[in-house]
Image (tube, helix red, strand yellow):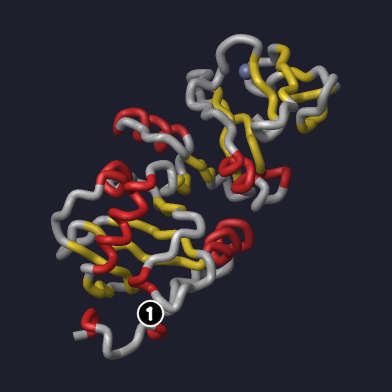
């Protein structure tokens, strides 16, 4: 975790600092080594069973949001406690998910954090990136209220894992470049959703606009498909 309570205040890990977990109140160890991002760890198991190993990817994402919105303790009526990666003033939670989640697990988090948004690390498996690129290169334009690239029935494991979520899912492929959306746009996140005609539709949104949308309420800005040459067969 990025924060622990030191004398009642949220503090980042520093060598020699003593803190307690804001979830369970037990002492935490400040881990300030060279290999991983500095973080706090429980002496035994993490009280939040949903907690993931804090990677640079998680940390960078949390840091895109104001500090007061990061790592917020949440408790439901049954007394279950979890730490939301980010919780906005309108109570929407943003979860940054690096590893695979079984469906039941995903559902219980969606229930607990309702309303919420998923941002999923698409770079965990190199194969996912290349499969997604392959998919885009044979996709066709699909537009309803917003345009995206769609494809019927073709198994893409990463997408399959996330497509049935109730809440919005954005895949983060980092700096990966996809020929399908040349010229390369500013960094984008791919929102994936089910659609009627297609098995799923992937829409690239400018990463900054996604952050601004959830933080400031500004409109989401989709990647401008008009930048794709009209000669592109996908317009046929
Ligand atoms: Zn704890």
In the rendered view, tell whether residue 78 sits above or below residue 101.
above
For the point 67% across and 35% down, which residue is it?
Answer: 37
Residue 164 in the image: x percent, y percent? 28, 45
The answer to whether residue 153 is left or right of residue 187 is left
Residue 205 in the image: x percent, y percent? 46, 66
The answer to whether residue 49 is left or right of residue 157 is right
Q: Quadrant of ligand 1?
A: top right
Please tell me in which quadrant of the rendered image residue 213 appears.
bottom right
Q: Quadrant of the N terminus?
A: top right
In the rendered view, tell whether residue 115 sits above or below residue 42.
below
Identify the residue under disc 1.
Answer: 225
Residue 138 in the image: x percent, y percent? 21, 68
Q: What is the residue that sits farthest to the bottom in this orientation?
A: 231
All told, the count of numbered labels is 1
Please tell me in which quadrant of the rendered image residue 150 appears.
bottom left
Q: Is mark 1 within 8 Å of ligand 1?
A: no
The answer to whether residue 207 is left or right of residue 147 is right
């Amino acid at each position: 975790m990025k924060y622990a309570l030191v004398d009642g205040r949220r503090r980042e890990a520093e060598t020699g600092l003593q803190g307690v977990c804001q979830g369970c109140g037990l002492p935490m160890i400040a881990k300030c080594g060279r290999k991983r991002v500095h973080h706090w760890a429980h002496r035994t198991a993490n009280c939040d069973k949903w907690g993931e190993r804090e990677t640079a990817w998680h940390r960078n994402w949390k840091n895109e949001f104001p500090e007061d919105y990061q790592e917020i303790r949440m408790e439901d009526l049954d007394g279950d406690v979890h730490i939301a990666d980010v919780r906005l003033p309108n109570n929407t939670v943003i979860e940054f998910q690096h590893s695979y989640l079984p469906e039941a697990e995903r559902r219980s988090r969606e229930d607990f954090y309702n309303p919420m948004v998923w941002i999923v690390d698409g770079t965990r498996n190199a194969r996912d990136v290349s499969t997604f690129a392959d998919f885009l290169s044979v996709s066709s334009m699909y537009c309803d209220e917003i345009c995206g690239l769609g494809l019927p029935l073709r198994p893409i494991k990463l997408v399959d894992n996330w497509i049935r979520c109730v809440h919005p899912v954005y895949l983060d492929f980092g700096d990966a470049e996809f020929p399908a959306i040349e010229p390369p746009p500013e960094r984008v996140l791919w929102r994936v959703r089910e659609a009627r005609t297609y098995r799923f539709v992937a829409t690239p949104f400018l990463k900054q606009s996604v952050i601004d949308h959830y933080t400031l309420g500004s409109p989401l800005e989709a990647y401008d498909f008009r930048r794709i040459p009209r000669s592109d067969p996908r317009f046929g």
